[in-house]
DNA sequence: AAATTCAGCGTACACGTGTTAGCCTAAATT
DNA sequence: AATTTAGGCTAACACGTGTACGCTGAATTT
């Protein structure tokens, strides 16, 4: 038995989350969003907000969690697409750019609060990015036979480049995003190439040393 | 003749700039800073603020310009250090990390407003980063004999990685920044290595095609 | 010496903010 | 059927905000 009361509560909680999401725009930061604005958009009295969240920060963290979840689901989708053949790098970037286009408010929120005032926000977002990164490092290690430390560093560099490019993509008209995506793909290949070169150099060193 | 009046005006203008800079902290964004707070810190009446800046945005842009200038001056310093020998990458990263430690408020401002609400801010900061990038691309082209397009892409990737690492450095205790710096150095070398590999691959392709 | 300029000030206004206290009413529990 | 629970409401508060207006007095120009 869910309870008609609990159902209603969940519904207006959802309304609050959506209200916040809807108000976010290139002109509106989450941190510039007021409790009253959100409540108004959700169609409830300002004071009722407290029945659902202790304060705006708690709402914001919920948004971050939801955004991170969406991103991770897309990553899984990415691996499925990969099974059908194609370049990992290209597919991942395309998926990522799609995410940015379809969830620009959430992605903007992640970027903004990543360097925002609240340590809790920053940590939550760092955690999301860490997921992204470690899954990539795992892939590089198991599928590409890179030693773990090199895989870690490569994954870190790649994630940095991708997120940075994603940030720039937000300010680009959709027509020009393609170009940025292509450049990013090339950069990731550059990094991948560099990593394997370094690995080979290291292993031949080891070989010649053991001879 | 400068005029005792003009001198005074410049002085309180400076006071406003410094007041803003002083109020910035991990807990205080520039955009969360109010005109009245700045005026109070500078020791003038709120309404007097308007004798110097049209609004807070204008003050903020001034801060961005000053910060960018500082960074570029450091770059020149970097080239001087280079003349005495040493790795470009290592020296550049060390200088950059120093900048972040000594000007953390300004760097934080750059990061935050890079994805902020004001398009003017975003453009101003993009311009500063562009400087950084094109000087690096120039260097890669002329000193390292890379073709311009490859130099551009490499420089872009490097700047993305460095700024991203810089952002993370802000949240690290100074003692742990060293480790991050070393990792970043390795990542830049990875990128450099990848770029030269790609260049060689391209030129041997061209050679074999012409045979 | 007289006239003008202008940085800085105090007052005042209208407005949006977060949050408290207390009431209402339908759902849930006893 | 009686009681308790809890989401939603209105009213009210104290406070900080940006900015318009008009004044003052010293520096500057005429």
Image: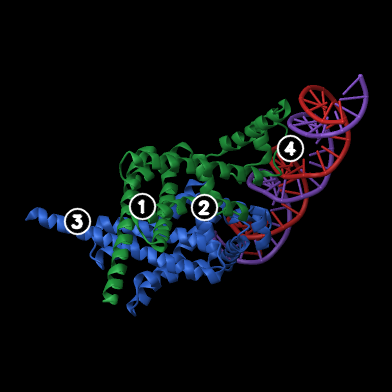
Chain colours: A blue, B green, C purple, D red
Apparent side of residue B174 relative to residue A147 in the rendered image (left or right): right
Q: Which is more foreground, mark 4 or mark 1?
A: 1
Q: Tell me the subunit letter for badge 2.
A: A
Q: Residue furthest toward the front? A: B211
Q: Are marks 1 and 3 in contact (CB under 8 Å)?
A: no
Q: Chain of mark 4?
A: B
User: Mark 2 and mark 3: span between their CA atoms?
Assistant: 39 Å
- Badge 4 is on which residue? B51
Q: Chain of mark 1?
A: B
Q: Earlier in the sequence, mark 2 or mark 3?
A: 2
Q: Are marks 2 and 3 on the same chain?
A: yes
Q: Quadrant of residue A195?
A: bottom left
The local secondary structure at tag 4 comes to helix
Task: Establish whether labels 3 and 4 are both on one chain.
Answer: no
Q: What residue appears at the point 40 percent right and 52 percent down from the top-left corner?
A: B139
Mark 4–mark 2 distance (CA, rounded to whole Å): 33 Å
Return the disc, 4 or 1, that comes first in the chain's sequence. Answer: 4
| Residue at 41% in and 61% down | B148
Residue at image mark 2: A113
Residue A149 placed where, x, y %? 26, 55
Task: Say if labels 2 and 1 share a chain.
Answer: no
How many circles with numbers are drawn on the protein?
4
Task: Tell me the element at label 3.
Answer: helix
The quarter of the rendered structure image containing the N terminus of chain B is top right
Chain label for disc 3 = A
């Amino acid at each position: 038995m869910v309870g008609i009361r609990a159902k209603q509560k969940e519904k207006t909680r959802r309304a609050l989350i959506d209200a916040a999401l809807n108000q976010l725009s290139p002109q509106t930061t989450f941190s510039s969003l007021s409790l009253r604005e959100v409540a108004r958009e959700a169609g409830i009295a300002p004071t009722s907000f407290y029945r659902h969240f202790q304060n705006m920060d708690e709402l914001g963290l919920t948004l971050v969690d939801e955004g991170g979840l969406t991103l991770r689901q897309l990553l899984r989708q990415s691996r499925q697409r990969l099974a059908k053949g194609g370049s990992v790098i290209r597919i991942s970037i395309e998926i990522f750019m799609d995410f940015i286009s379809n969830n620009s408010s959430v992605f903007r929120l992640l970027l903004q609060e990543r360097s925002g005032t609240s340590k809790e926000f920053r940590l939550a977002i760092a955690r999301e990015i860490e997921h992204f990164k470690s899954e990539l490092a795992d892939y590089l290690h198991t599928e590409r036979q890179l030693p773990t430390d090199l895989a870690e560093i490569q994954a870190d560099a790649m994630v940095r480049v991708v997120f940075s490019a994603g940030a720039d993509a937000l300010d680009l008209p959709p027509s020009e995003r393609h170009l940025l995506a292509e450049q990013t793909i090339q950069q990731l290949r550059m990094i991948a190439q560099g990593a394997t070169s370094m690995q080979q150099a290291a292993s031949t060193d080891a070989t010649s040393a053991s001879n």
